[in-house]
Image (spheres, helix red, strand yellow):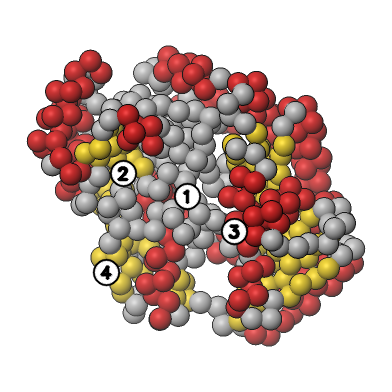
Amino acid sequence: MPTFDPSSERALLDDLRAVLGSNKVLAGPSARKAYDCDAYTVDKSEPLAVVLPESTTDVQTIVRWCLAHGVPYTPRGAGTGLSGGTLPALGGLVVSTKKMTRILEVDLDNRCLLAQSGAVNKRLSEAVAHAGLHFAPDPSSQTVSTLGGNIAENSGGPHTLKYGVTVQHVLKVTMVDPLGEIVTIGSRTENLPGYDFLSLIVGGEGTLGIVTEAWVKLTPNPVKVETVLASFPRVRDATQTVADIIAEGTIPAALEMMDRGIMKAVSLAFGLKYPPDAEALLLIECDGAPETVAAEMDTVTRLCRANGSLELNVAQNEAERLKLWTARKKGIGAMGRLAPSIVTQDGVIPRSKLPEMLDFIAEVARDAGVGIANIFHAGDGNLHPCFYFDDRDPDQVRAVVAGGDRILQKCLDLGGSLSGEHGIGVEKLDLMETMFGKEGLVIQADAKRVFNESPLCNPCKVLPNQKSCVEHRRRWRGAAW
């Protein structure tokens, strides 16, 4: 295989434009800077160029061109990922799906639709709202995040607790594999016999190929929805309420928690008001048949009061419901009011360990000398501690990276996981062996080789110590620090 020579970039770009068309190639300092990272901004690496395919055939052309010239390539959706999954670690091309936004077919009878991978998550639900259906995965970035990115990261969202993550809602994908071949994985018929390769693709972070189209399931809208925002004087009161709700066998559609840092941010950004003595909020949503929702809401409100809630605000209509969701959906974005830089962590712990874990996160913040606010899926123990800091200060960056590693190690120590929905990317590579052991990583590498013998397809992600990436990892980490 040819080796990519950065010194020949002018000739490479001329050839790429001739093959793909100049309107589908972005180059120059501005484009490279705009695509040098995703929403995880600690690590950065500029690409040679950005390409904008419009079809599966375009993607195939790009991948075959990269293979012929030894150029690495990195797929990218909206760039809202939070672990460096779309970082062009070895340079090369960023393959942006921002022009692949079409919904190609809607099958209402069988409750599924086919869309290109650049289609925005929320648009899928909007396209079938008239039929009383929606696409259930709902990451907080759903107004901009794309189907392909959701598939790559196996994204979740606030309603994961009841409805599951992306893998439960994908039936079939079309993708361009690392050999430049167009392949289909899965079927519109569920529960097929044989090996479940689709579940390797979903959550594979674009390391096994570039998904260009997908058939997804559509879920009926619930008949009844009730939403309550409860405030508590202590974080431990809120976490105890979470444990009590689940212990009684009630599984809300969503069970989300926010702390005082998030309340401050959304208050500054949107003028929202909360009880002055509140240290934590729980946003709880129940949906389903009216009698089921009524029973669940009785349980939820009773347990909130039993654990000392300061205020219970139950939405009386859709407008009020959407307002209650503001703190959760807009919380991370609002943190720009607190500091110029944000890093959102993602780890999972058993729900029973929430009080211990949140105490530990507060300790990490004190030791690091930076701010941390918490906003997370409390119902399934999926944490999102958000560091807020100034990335122009190398000492603060070092403190954030070290603090994030401490938090993730604690998740593992408590019997949890490195990620619930943000993926590994480049951020968590160094902890993969701690979680899986050397033997576990060997098995994962063997599975990857079924699809990807090439070192060019989204290199340096998920699996640590890839030979071509070790030196570059030192380089980009050094530059960031």
Secondary structure at numbered mark 1: loop
Say above or below: 164 vs 435.
below
Foreground tag (2 vs 4): 2
Residue 391 appears in the figure: yes
Residue named by callout 1: 154
Name the residue rendered at 55%, 64% in the picture. Answer: 163
Which residue lies under the disc numbered 2? 96
Q: Residue furthest toward the left?
A: 18
CA distance separating discs 2 and 1 = 18 Å
Labels 2, 1: front one: 2
Answer few, some or many: residues within 10 Å of disc 2's Cα (few below 14, many 20 plus, some between 14 and 19).
many
Question: Can you tell which mark lies on residue 339?
Answer: none
Determine crowd level at label 3: few under 14, some 14-19, many 20+ residues with C-alpha closer than 10 A. some
Spatial CA span between label 3 and label 2: 25 Å
Of mark 1 and mark 3, the one earlier in the sequence is: 1
Three-letter code for the amino acid on which mark 2 is drawn: Ser
